[in-house]
Image (spheres, helix red, strand yellow):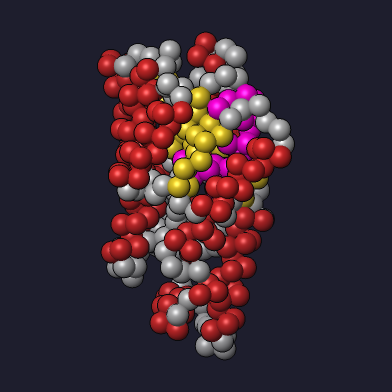
Amino acid sequence: MSQRFSNGYTGLVAVVTGGGTGMGRELVRQLTQQGCHVATCDVIAENLEETAQMCVNDAHPGEVLTFVADVSNETQVLAFRDAVAAWKPHVHVLFNNAGIGGGGSLIDNSREEWEKTFNVCWGGVYLNTRAFLPLLLKAPFGHIVNTSSVNGFWASLGPSVSHSAYSAAKFAVKGFTEALITDFRLTAPTLGVSVVMPGHIGTSIMINSGKLHGNDPKEMSVEQIAQIRERYEKSGIDTSSASDEDIRVLLQMGAEGFRDAAPMTAADASAHILSEVAQGKWRILVGDDAVVLDEEVRKDPSIAYEPEFLERIHTRGALNQITG
C-alpha cells in the first residue's frame, strides 16, 4: 500500500462515474465492501438503482449515494457535485470511469454520434475533474483515477473498422492524466493521479452505447439497418442473404458476446485497478491483452496500423476477438 492508502479504502469517500454497470458497478461494490463511502452517477437510472441495491443486499459497510447524471453535461455534473458536497465534507478518490462507444468514423457516422461519444469519454473526465477538485483539495489527500483504454495508445480495432471518436477521446484522457502528474506536484501536492488502460473487459458498454445512441438492435429503423449493411459491405461482408431481423440478431449477439466472452471480467478488472491505485501506481494496464498490445506498440509504432500488426498481436494470443 502507498502511504496515501495505508488503510486501504476503509473510511474514505469515493466518487465513481458510470456506476450502473460494468467496471463502474464493480468499483462501487468492491469499495463499499471495504467500508468506503461511495457516491456514484449514471445516465440509466434503473442500472444505478440495481448497483445500490446489490450493496445493500450484500450488507456492505460503506454507504452509497446515487445520482442520475450525464457526465458530458456540465449542469448535471455540478448538480451531482453539489449532492456529494451536501452528503460528505470532502472526497478522497474520484474514479472517472464513465464511457460509451460509437462514432467510429469521421466520415460515415453523424457528427452528433461522434461528438456524443467524444464528449462522454473525454468531456466527462474533464468536467468531473473540474467539478470535484474543491472537494478533493479539502481532503487530507486526494486521488483521481481516469479510465482511458488500450485505445488511448492504439487508435484502432483492427484494419477493417473505423474507431476515431472513442480513440481520440481515450488519447486525450491519457495525455491529460499524464500532464496532471507534474501539474499536481507543482500546484497541489496533496493530489495524485492514475491512468487506467483496460483491454477487452467483460462489460455491457456495447449494449449501453447502442441504447444511448438510439442504435439498440431491437429498435433500429429500416434506415439504420441499411446503414449497418453498407458498413458490413465496406468491410467485405456480404449481407445480401440476411434479413433485417438477421442483422438485428447479429448485432445483439456481438454486443452480448463482447460482454460474455471477454478474457477478463469486470470484477477482476476492478479489483486490479483498486489494488494498483492503492499501491501508488500511476500507469495501470488491465488485462494480459493490454500488456501485450502495449509492448508491441512500443516495440515498433511505425507498423501499428498495418494489417500485419494485428497478426503479430494474435500470434501472442491477444485480441483474438478482433479480426483483420
- Does the segment drawn in magenta span residue 188? no
Q: Which x, y percent locates residue 212?
A: 44, 61
Residue at the far front in the pictured view: 86
Total tally of numbered discs in the picture: 0
- Does the segment drawn in magenta span residue 30? yes
Q: Quadrant of the N terminus?
A: top right
Specify the quadrant of the image occupied by residue 143. Answer: top left
Q: Which x, y percent locates residue 23?
A: 57, 42
Q: Which x, y percent locates residue 299?
A: 46, 39
Q: Is residue 72 left or right of residue 196?
A: left
What's the residue at 57%, 63% (across, down)? 255
| 39 over 289 or under it: above or below | above
| 57 over 274 or under it: above or below | below
Q: Nearer the viewer, residue 13 or 5?
A: 13
Q: Is residue 120 visible?
A: yes
Q: Is residue 173 visible?
A: no
Q: Which x, y percent locates residue 300?
A: 43, 42
Q: Nearer the viewer, residue 207 or 232?
A: 207
The magenta span reads: 17-37
Residue at the far bottom in the pictured view: 241
Q: Nearer the viewer, residue 161 or 57?
A: 57
What's the residue at 67%, 42% (across, down)? 54
| 242 over 216 or under it: above or below | below
What's the residue at 50%, 24% (across, down)? 13
What's the residue at 55%, 74% (across, down)? 218
| 264 over 270 or under it: above or below | below
